[in-house]
Image (cartoon, grey):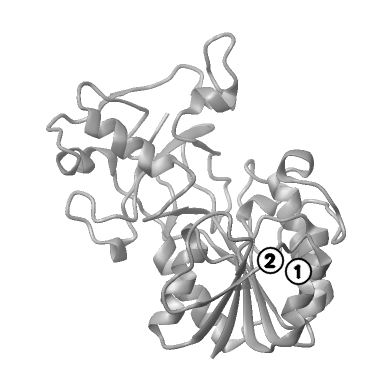
Amino acid sequence: MRLLVLGGTRFLGRAIVDDAVSRGYDVTTFTRGLSGHPRPGAEALHGDRTNADDLRELTQREWDGVIDTSTLAPAHVLASAEILAPRVQHYTYISTISVYATRPGEGVTEDSPVLDCPADATGTVETLGYGELKAGAERAVAAALPGRGLIVRPGLIVGPHEDVGRLPWWLARMARGGTVLAPGEPGQPVRMTDARDLASWVVDNTRRGLPATINVPGPEGMSPAIAPCAPACGTGRSPTRCTTPGCGSGRRRRPAGRSARSCTGPRSAWIPARSSRSSPVSASGPGYACQLWATGMNCGGRSRKTLSSGAISC
């Protein structure tokens, strides 16, 4: 299989490239060359997708499939998809469950309404919003390659080489030792996906040319993960737990003068109570919960394939 990966040097993109190379596929990456390093076994092309001249470099080749891991404006995704449409059989776009208009208040399915953002929108995550940007990019792929696109909507992605800062923050904190405050109830369920398992699934279905939109939130039923990581991080103390007053209010509690972003530390995520209907992506629990994620590593003797490490929440 001839595979083009738009991105491919960081976190999920890196895992996708490594998985495809391990299968013996002919893999090409297209990046700016500003972050990460080319992966062994893959051909590295460099260019800026926001530059029309750089993008035209891709017109000299053909591929069986393309996987787009970017967080670019819909207009740039549209330009890439349009220029590649005559040259690829299938286009996979890595989106997010954050595209749903009713999240985080309600459970969702693939048929739930999506945020409004046009396929040709310009801007950034800061100006458009993360969910809106991804929703517009989904529409761009659908417009350029009707019936030839796979839209992947993951939930929380964790694992080696994570560059978001959730798991690394907690491992570093546990390694410092001392009393570690772990807010909330340990039984609060969350759903997450190991980047390597998601990468394998994405490569499988790109090879198959699957035309679909699919939520990939990870399996249900997570167990506490911070405490088992303590021995692996060199500390014998289990986290001290507490319940934060007002957790169900849906508001972040923070000291005066500090922004919500600076107060979260490990980039916590906010998860609502499950609605009365069964949801494939929402967690359950009282009110909003700030999740402290940790999974995807051989931490405390757990295998990544278990995909059932967990989180503690406040």
Q: Earlier in the sequence, mark 1 or mark 2?
A: 2
Q: Amino acid under label 1?
A: Asp
Give the image quarter of residue 135.
Answer: bottom right
- Residue placed at 32% from the left, 56% from the top? 308
- Residue placed at 36% from the left, 56% from the top? 160
Vertical order, 289 against 162 (above or below)? above
Vertical order, 186 against 121 (above or below)? above
Callout 1 environment at 10 Å: few (<14), some (14 to 19), or many (20+)? some
Q: Quadrant of the C terminus?
A: top left
Give the image quarter of residue 213.
Answer: bottom right
- Residue placed at 18% from the left, 49% from the top? 300
x, y percentage for residue 307? Answer: 34, 60
Q: Quadrant of the N terminus?
A: bottom right
Disc 1 + disc 2, Cβ < 8 Å: yes
Cα distance between the residues tagged 1 and 2: 5 Å
For residue 47, the mark is 2
- Whether residue 130 sits left or right of residue 144 in the image: it is left
x, y percentage for residue 179? Answer: 22, 21
- Whether residue 131 sits left or right of residue 166 in the image: it is right
x, y percentage for residue 128? Answer: 78, 44
Q: Amino acid under label 2?
A: Gly
Is residue 61 visible in the rendered image? The answer is yes
Is residue 113 visible in the rendered image? The answer is no
Q: Secondary structure at mark 1?
A: helix
Which is nearer the eye, 72 or 142? 72
Vertical order, 30 against 230 (above or below)? below
Residue designated by label 1: 54
Q: Secondary structure at mark 2?
A: loop
- Whether residue 199 sits left or right of residue 179 in the image: it is right
- Whether residue 223 sits left or right of residue 106 in the image: it is left
